[in-house]
Amino acid sequence: MTVQKDKIITIDGPSGAGKSTIARLLATTSGYTYIDSGAIYRGIAYAFTTRKNQEAIEEVLEDLPLSFEFGENTRVVLAGRDISEEIRRPEISLVASSLSQLASVRNYANAIQRELAKKGNVVLEGRDTGSVVFPDADIKFYLDARPDERAGRRYNELASKGSGAELATVKEEMEKRDRNDARRALAPLVIPAGAIVVDTTGADAQGVLQIILGHIEGKDSH
């Protein structure tokens, strides 16, 4: 099936639920642009951790030489250097989770996402894309899966990139981030109003994609 053009589609959910994989597949299938909102926060976090002096995050954001290329692959560049792989490290994820609780950081990231989505034809994934960034998105999804399965997926993803992290450590850090994201006062991880909830436990990517496409087809036909 083909997805109608000019739409904004959001996919939210916790770590390891399959958001990135499904968002990429959906974007490729529909001819949309995939926007990885997590890469924006991770890029900010990486830049913040590399500053030698103790600048406040607001000062870092004022002249941050950070750029993003979204499409089939996400590319993050800091001061001319590609940091696309470095931002995926678990310790950067935790810093990103912490910084995402600050209004200045969220405003910075939200502005980038809204600018990119002005003309539609985008699939965005993250933790508040359907609840805060695009509350009026055309179609919203919320993916989830059992914690053990989510941790296993995250571990396999890191292992494929040469990380030596232990599964128990990955699970512990994922659970910590889940708690941070759900409990934060600003834009907590929630099921967005009107979102379609999809449990990806035990399902492969193509199976989940077909479920997603079926829901989109149903909405488009109304």
Image (tube, rainbow, N blue to C red):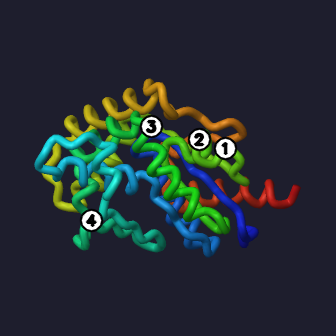
Mark nearer the viewer, 1 or 4: 4
Give me the disc on residue 110: none
Q: How crowded is mark 3: few (under 14 residues within 10 Å), some or many (20 or more)?
A: few
Q: Which of 189 and 146 is in front in this view?
A: 189
The mark nearer the N terminus, 2 or 3, is: 3
Label 2 sits on residue? 132
Residue depicted at 39% across the width and 32% down the height: 178
Tell me which corner region of the image, top left, top right, bottom left or bottom right, holds residue 94: top left
The disc, 3 or 1, on the residue closer to the chain's N-terminal end is 3
Name the residue carrying label 1: 135
Residue annotated with mark 4:
78
What separation in Å lies between label 2 and label 4 (alpha carbons)? 26 Å
**Which is closer to the viewer, label 3 or label 1?**
3
Q: Where is residue 37 in the image (x, y as percent from the top left)?
A: 46, 54
Of mark 2 and mark 4, the one earlier in the sequence is 4
Asked whether residue 2 appears in the rendered view, the answer is: yes
Q: As drawn, is 167 to the left or to the right of 68?
A: left
Crowding near the residue tagged with mark 4, few <14, some 14–19, many ≥20 C-alpha atoms within 10 Å: some
In three-dimensional space, the C-alpha distance between marks 3 and 1, rounded to whole angstroms, equals 17 Å
Q: Distance between the residues labelled 1 and 4?
A: 30 Å
| Front tag of 2 and 4 | 4
Residue for badge 3: 103
Q: Where is residue 219 in the image (x, y as percent from the top left)?
A: 80, 54
Please tell me which of labels 1 and 4 falls first in the chain: 4
110 and 9: which one is in front?
110
Identify the amino acid type marked 1: Pro
Q: What element carries label 2?
A: helix
Do tag 4 and tag 3 residues touch (Cβ < 8 Å)?
no
User: Looking at the image, do the residues carrying marks 2 and 3 touch, with CB atoms under 8 Å apart?
Assistant: no
